[in-house]
Image (spheres, rainbow, N blue to C red):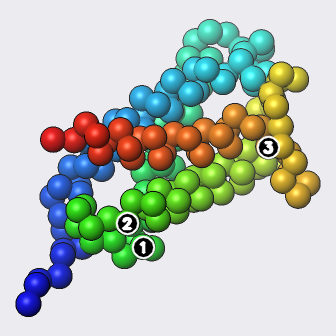
Amino acid sequence: MQMAAARWYRDPAALWYIALGYLPWLAGLNLAWEVAHVPLYTLWQEAEPAYIAFSIVHCTLGDVLIGGVALLLALILGRERALPHWRWGRVAAVTVALGAGYTVFSEWMNITVLRNWSYAESMPTLDLGGIEIGLTPLAQWLVVPPLALVLARKTRT
């Protein structure tokens, strides 16, 4: 009789994969994305360089927090077991859905309700049932977390 695999949170390999694989890749990829799309916000034309740099770091750290929580929730909701038994497609899909869902809410809240920031005219937007959201923040959550998951798998020892 084969013993059931341990839960992901009891698997040292899974914890190392998250901490030393996924999160560093997520941070680096999000930093690159933030640098690339900051000109699509009015901040680029209106703020001082130091504040732009602060905003990029602040947003990158927020992205890592969102992406980390999204992955943890995907693992919890999927009742994932040890790393070799992860259902990678499901884990990635739920992580993306949670990250993208939060981003839609956050962009709407910060652009429409709180007016903390605004898009430059060059930002491509998408109308999601009356909520106008920038295409690049949404695309970020469709691309970056799955890519970080794949790269972490390929580079883990």
Closer mark to the observer between disc 1 and disc 2: 2
User: What's the distance in space between the residues labelled 2 and 3, CA to CA?
Assistant: 31 Å
Q: Earlier in the sequence, mark 2 or mark 3?
A: 2
Identify the secondary structure beneath mark 1.
Answer: loop
Identify the residue at the far front of this view: 1
Q: Position of residue 23 (x, y in %)?
A: 36, 42
Residue sitting at x 55%, y 54%: 96
Q: Earlier in the sequence, mark 3 or mark 1?
A: 1
User: What's the distance in space between the residues labelled 3 and 1, CA to CA?
Assistant: 29 Å
The label on residue 133 is 3
Q: Position of residue 53 (x, y in %)?
A: 56, 17
Residue sitting at x 42%, y 29%: 28
Residue type at mark 2 is Arg
The label on residue 78 is 1
Q: Position of residue 147 (x, y in %)?
A: 45, 40
Horizontally, residue 9 falls left or right of residue 45, namely: left
The residue where tag 2 is placed is: 87
User: What's the distance in space between the residues labelled 1 and 2, CA to CA?
Assistant: 8 Å
Horizontally, residue 80 falls left or right of residue 12, namely: right
Q: Which quadrant of the rendered structure holds the C terminus? A: top left
Is 130 situated above or below 121?
Answer: below
Q: Earlier in the sequence, mark 1 or mark 2?
A: 1
Is any atom of residue 3 visible in this view?
Answer: yes
Residue sitting at x 42%, y 73%: 78
Identify the secondary structure beneath mark 2.
Answer: loop
